[in-house]
Amino acid sequence: MHKYPLLSKLLLIGFLMALLAIPLSLVRDVIAERTANRYNATQEVARAHAGPQTITGPVLWLPYTETFLRTVKVDGQVGQTREELVTEERVSIQFPQTLDTTSQLATETRLRGIFPVTVYTSQHASRGRFVWKEVLPHHRGGQIAFGQPLLLVGVSDARGLLAAPQLRLAGAVLPVQQAPGSSPLPLAAQVNLAQLKPGAVLDFDLNFDLAGTGRIGWVPLADENSVTLTSPWPHPSFGGDFLPRTRRISASGFEATWRVPSLSSRAQTQFAQAGKERAPVEQFSVGLEDPVDVYRLTERATKYAGMFIVLTFAAFFVLEMVKRWRIHPMQYLMIGAALVLFFLLVLSLSEHLSFALAYGLASTACIALLAHYLRHVLGGWRPGLAMSALLVALYGVLYGILVSEDNALMMGSLLLFGVLAAIMVATRKIDWYNVMGSDVPPAAAPHAARRTPGQHPGALA
């Protein structure tokens, strides 16, 4: 290997980069552990406060029995039949014709240890209309006996109710209680059966306050659904099966309106089948997630750590060739250790400070340390500061990649292209045969490829 010093140096640098992958993997493990701790903190707050909420209904729920005669064959007697009386239990589910909801949501940040968790309280005012459809027997001659009709309302976590919902149906105030165990929704109010006449118009008003954590959503069960939500939260994340028709988002909050007709949603069919198949029901929601997730950003940063170390080592190696510097492999290793430690510093500081400030402090500390170290390695402040300026550029580009996820690929590609162009320009006059320690003199290579006129192209002159 002494015959090829450049190759030896390249292999050694490659070994050092592979060695630095070990502490990098440990940093990633720490990030995963802190992310899991943050998730556990969120779950603990949700258990004590209330979890994510999905509002369903109201719907009219009428259990009934149908009695009819059925003709069956007599066992053991060919051609003989008899009639038996059969009773089947059924439910008539009727959805609102219209449902308009106006909601307001206020957020609050609570700390569980060092982990911030966003909780909210919300006020909901709904107005709508039922038009009762006649319930007909499924079998000819069947007789129907109705049970107690209920108006059902659903929330994902009933612990989030700050007071009993206020419900008015057809002008009458109905007390809301816990629904029976056979009901698909947790809240119910008893309805007067005499009001349920075919074609009867039943207007209703429903008001309640609801607390939750992280997300709030609605199931569009009416024929015409409209929900308007306003909140001072400046970073809404709209999700689910339907996006809002209109939205206004600013630093002071947001306002969003959803309009979902039953023709564009299968929620009614899915809800009717939920008791049998437990099928998921279409919904729309808004999440109250912090857009600057320090763990996600730090994890993304570590994904670029390998490229970061390669570019730094490449810059040192090329300048070592061009400037005739002498950098020992142990010095490469310590420089790489400082680069790896940067990511751990960003993680630890960002748990207490904003990510931008944590990134700035961590990069400043690492650059200052490397500048002081390189001053002695390279024999003066001038080359040390020059290399520090290169590191400033690399840290700046990495931060741009992290905060601009949509442009990360473009910025990373431009960075790699720029580094390659800089290396090619810086090394354009290097005699690689001499540097590599090759036995073939640089001037002999072109001569070896010459051939005399008329000679076969495969023969050497």
Image: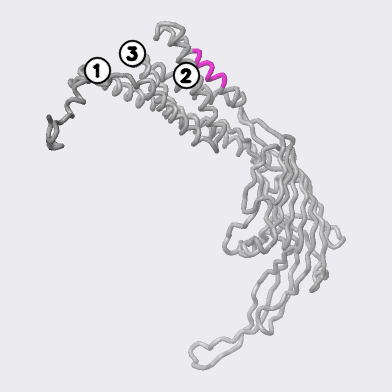
**Depth check: 205 or 231 in front?**
231
Q: Main secondary structure of the magenta part?
A: helix
Tell me the amino acid under the disc marked 2. Answer: Leu
Return the disc, 3 or 1, that comes first in the chain's sequence: 3
Helix, strand or loop under label 3: loop
Tell me the amino acid under the disc marked 3. Answer: His
State which quadrant residue 310 falls in.
top left
Residue 272 relative to residue 334: left or right: right
Residue drawn at x 53%, y 88% is 74
Residue 120 seen in the figure: yes
Which residue range is magenta in the image? 360-368
Q: Which mark is residue 434?
A: 1
Return the disc, 2 or 1, that comes first in the chain's sequence: 2
| Foreground tag (2 vs 1) | 1
Q: Which residue is mark 3?
A: 328
Count neighbours of disc 1 (C-alpha within 10 A) and say few if under 14, some if 14 to 19, many if 20 or more: some
Helix, strand or loop under label 2: helix
**In which quadrant is the C terminus drawn?**
top left
- The residue sitting at the bottom extreme is 79
Residue 113 relative to residue 322: left or right: right
**In which quadrant is the N terminus drawn?**
top left
Return the disc, 3 or 2, that comes first in the chain's sequence: 3
Tell me the amino acid under the disc marked 1. Answer: Asn
| Foreground tag (3 vs 1) | 1
> Does the magenta-highlighted stretch encompass residue 364?
yes
Q: Position of residue 120 (x, y in %)?
A: 71, 40
Q: Which residue is mark 2?
A: 390
Helix, strand or loop under label 1: helix
Q: Position of residue 259 (x, y in %)?
A: 71, 55
